[in-house]
Image: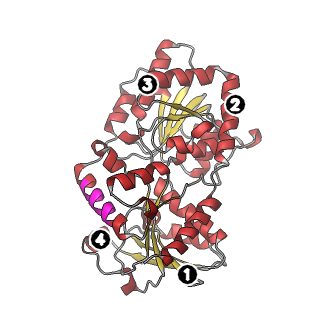
Amino acid sequence: MKSILRIGIDISTLLNHGSDIGAGRYIFNLVKSLLETDKKNTYILTGRCILADCFDTVNKLKKESAGRRVELKIFNTTQKKLDLQNRFGFPPLELSGLRVDILHCPDYLVPPTLNKNIILTIHDLAFVRFPEFNFNWFVKKYTREVSKNARRAKIVIADSISTKNDITRFFKIKPEKVGVVYLAADRIFNRLPGNKKDKNFLKKYGIDKKYILSVGTIEPRKNFITLIRAFNSIRKENPDFNYKLVIVGRTGWKSEATYAERENSHYREDIIFAGRVPDEDLVQIYNQAELFVYPSLFEGFGLPPLEAMSCGLPVIASDTSSLREVVGDGGILVKAGDEHELANMILNVLKNKNLKETLGEKSLTRARKFSWANTAKKTIELYHKTTLLK
């Protein structure tokens, strides 16, 4: 094994989609923590960029990596060229000058490469578990591509035990080939003292009274329809329930039914879709919420509830997949898709001050179990393990 490694990380997802989606946030925080933790190896950040403004992200990474052993190999391309390169697996990145001992592909896909030491991160297999929530072409393409990449990789990283079990079950990958490395909340997400909470951030989004919060891409798997129906039920049966429901997140695919549920609600004026929100605003929105609810049907990890717990919010989440591992005893878990149980639990927490405060403290305790330093440390261990495998 070489004493000093040149470790390549494909940051294409971060460059092209930003850090406000789960995979982008994972890549940014992983790179940042690796550069802080690893004083020995050299990191080569590579990616194929189709956006003109992606170099804002590159400059941010340069700032984070100042004085550390890091190189940038970013290639401009177009969507058409990118599709052709992925389809034919050519030209390999090595022809453009990439020289690395290990290539970490942190978001399902492997770029054209001649490298044999590939580490692949698979965040979840939602497209296999719930194909009805995606388009047929996507399910077929991703199932084929990701299973092929999992077999090609020397090591597969899963965000949770739940995801590892899915990878071994659906792709027939040996369990010893799959390492579980938990994620963590971005350090910006923490409990703010009272004098740091700014109501002006809320006004920007039309939030003018107490509110229940949820965060995630607007798509069927996130199950916001159940949350809206639970909110409707509470409002109907409790005329004095004076809260708004705020849902933060970009629009994803098959989102029409979720937006229609809001439009058909008698209480739609108190249901806010805030859209994409900058992190500095999101920290304020987390900290000033009364309760965080995550009704997702399935997660590979689930960063939003962990972000909420890091801010000291009481959390209610679905008792499913990786959410059992992430939320654990730090919040309340309810049956996924059961709007009546969800409504009852929301009402119970908001009406019981002691329970609400206890859950807030449990959230903070639970969140401390996850850190990007640990994520980086375990990832580095897998990098070195890769070099020992034939």
Mark 4 highlights which residue? 86
Disc number for residue 358:
2
Label 3 or label 2, whichever comes before in sequence order? 3
User: Magenta segment range?
Assistant: 140-148
How crowded pointer 4 is (Cα within 10 Å; few <14, some 14-19, many 20+) is rated as: some
Mark 3 highlights which residue? 339
Instruction: Give the quadrant of residue 97.
Output: bottom left
Disc number for residue 154:
none
Q: Nearer the viewer, mark 2 or mark 1?
A: 1
Q: Nearer the viewer, mark 4 or mark 2?
A: 2
Alpha carbons under labels 3 and 2: distance apart:
24 Å
Q: Nearer the viewer, residue 339 or 211?
A: 339
Check disc 3 and give the amino acid type: Glu
Whether residue 64 is visible here, answered yes or no, is yes
Alpha carbons under labels 3 and 4: distance apart:
42 Å
How crowded pointer 1 is (Cα within 10 Å; few <14, some 14-19, many 20+) is rated as: some
Could you say whether the residue bearing mark 2 is in a helix, strand or loop?
helix
Alpha carbons under labels 4 and 2: distance apart:
50 Å
How crowded pointer 2 is (Cα within 10 Å; few <14, some 14-19, many 20+) is rated as: few
| Whether residue 96 is situated above or below residue 197 in the rendered picture | below
Check disc 4 and give the amino acid type: Asn
| Whether residue 326 is situated above or below residue 348 in the rendered picture | below
Could you say whether the residue bearing mark 4 is in a helix, strand or loop?
helix
The residue sitting at 56% across, 21% down in the picture is 347
